[in-house]
């Protein structure tokens, strides 16, 4: 069944439409693509279907679980909190969250926490997807968790746990959840269709994720595959703890009502392609787009200060430049 490609591109970006249309020769089911260039929207395309059965067309308003792209949205919301002089990256986390300052974490700074240096890439006990959807349980577990390495001595990807940190600090300082704060400070001013914690009325617009529903450990990789090498490495316990406790299955878990309702700010934001592109267009323009400013240039510079570079990530096994929440190229 040939997909219907819709949307607009400016003349100089017409070849992008051809590449986008070619996706369906490579087993793609549905997708959206939006690009801003120098503050102007130059590509806004969508096509295919929202479901594996190919019964619901993908539209401009189709929402997608954006997984770790949510970390960037949460980092922006947190940077706005800094811009309001309500929190300091260099202050200790326990200053704002006293329960956090136990088990060797008393001196962890906000900057270290946001840049994946705190040693909290996972929790020691086995947890479930239901636990991830329970904000109080997860923040309680993480506050009591002993670091998996000496904080500040190394960095390791906090794949799922990371989102609870900016969210809990925002909640304690403002009284609002991260999703509420993000809506007030980013989504509403920019008029973007991006959500951290999705209201029930929007669930019908969500694309069904198409992916494996088994543990990555069960998949056979080639000997050259870096992921398999990491699983079998001496430090593989860190990888499993961060990435596979719990296993999050695309169909069963990440498309469920409980998942969509929850605020899991490292992994379960929902957005349209246009919404994400518009937010980053504002960031690329020093925090302002078409007369709407969401963050000062100075605060954005603070948020993008390099905190980690030139060292191997203990979880992923390769170098990543990290700022205060954002990953840098």
Image (cartoon, rainbow, N blue to C red):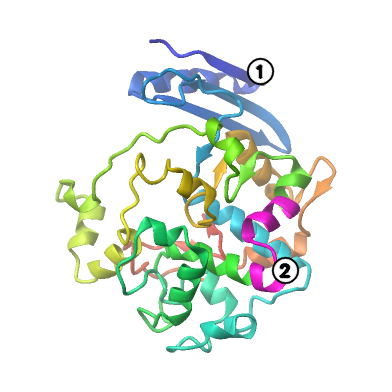
Q: Residue at x 24, y 50 (%)?
A: 216
Q: Position of residue 122 (x, y in %)?
A: 37, 69
How many discs mark residues in the rendered view?
2
Q: Residue at x 59, y 76 (%)?
A: 110
- Residue 152 visible in the displayed image: no
Would you say 222 lies left or right of 70 here? left
Would you say 263 lies left or right of 153 here? right
Foreground disc of the pair 1, 2: 2
Q: Position of residue 123 (x, y in %)?
A: 36, 72
Q: Is tag 1's residue or tag 2's residue first in the polypeptide sequence?
A: 1
Q: Secondary structure at mark 1?
A: helix
Tag 1 residue = 11
Tag 2 residue = 174
Relative to residue 298, is residue 18 depicted above or below?
above
- Specify start and end residues of the magenta stretch as a single range: 170-185
Q: Position of residue 140 (x, y in %)?
A: 48, 75
Would you say 144 lies left or right of 27 here? right
């Amino acid at each position: 069944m040939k997909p219907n490609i819709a949307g607009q591109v400016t003349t100089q970006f017409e070849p992008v439409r051809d590449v986008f249309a070619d996706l369906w020769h490579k087993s793609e089911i549905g997708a959206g693509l939006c690009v801003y260039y120098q503050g102007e929207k130059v590509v806004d395309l969508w096509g295919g279907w929202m479901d594996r059965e190919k019964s619901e067309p993908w539209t401009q308003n189709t929402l997608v679980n954006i997984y770790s792209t949510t970390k960037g949205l949460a980092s922006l919301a947190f940077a706005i909190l800094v811009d309001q002089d309500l929190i300091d990256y260099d202050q200790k986390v326990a200053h704002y969250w006293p329960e956090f300052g136990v088990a060797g974490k008393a001196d962890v700074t906000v900057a270290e926490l946001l840049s994946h240096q705190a040693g909290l890439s996972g929790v020691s006990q086995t947890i479930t997807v239901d636990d991830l959807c329970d904000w109080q349980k997860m923040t309680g577990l993480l506050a009591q968790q002993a670091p998996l390495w000496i904080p500040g001595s190394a960095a390791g990807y906090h794949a799922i746990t990371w989102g609870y940190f900016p969210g809990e600090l925002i909640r304690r300082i403002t009284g609002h959840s991260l999703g509420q704060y993000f809506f007030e400070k980013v989504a509403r001013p920019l008029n973007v269709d991006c959500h951290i914690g999705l209201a029930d009325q929007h669930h019908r617009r969500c694309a069904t994720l198409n992916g494996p529903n088994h543990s990555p450990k069960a998949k056979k990789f080639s000997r050259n595959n870096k992921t398999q090498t990491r699983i079998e490495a001496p430090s593989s316990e860190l990888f499993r703890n961060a990435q596979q406790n719990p296993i999050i299955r695309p169909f069963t878990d990440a498309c469920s009502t409980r998942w969509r309702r929850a605020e899991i700010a490292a992994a379960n934001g929902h957005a349209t392609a246009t919404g994400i592109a518009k937010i980053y267009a504002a960031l690329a323009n020093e925090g302002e787009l078409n007369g709407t400013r969401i963050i000062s240039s100075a605060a954005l510079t603070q948020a993008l200060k390099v905190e980690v570079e030139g060292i191997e990530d203990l979880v992923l096994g390769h170098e990543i430049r990290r700022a205060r929440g954002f990953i840098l190229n």
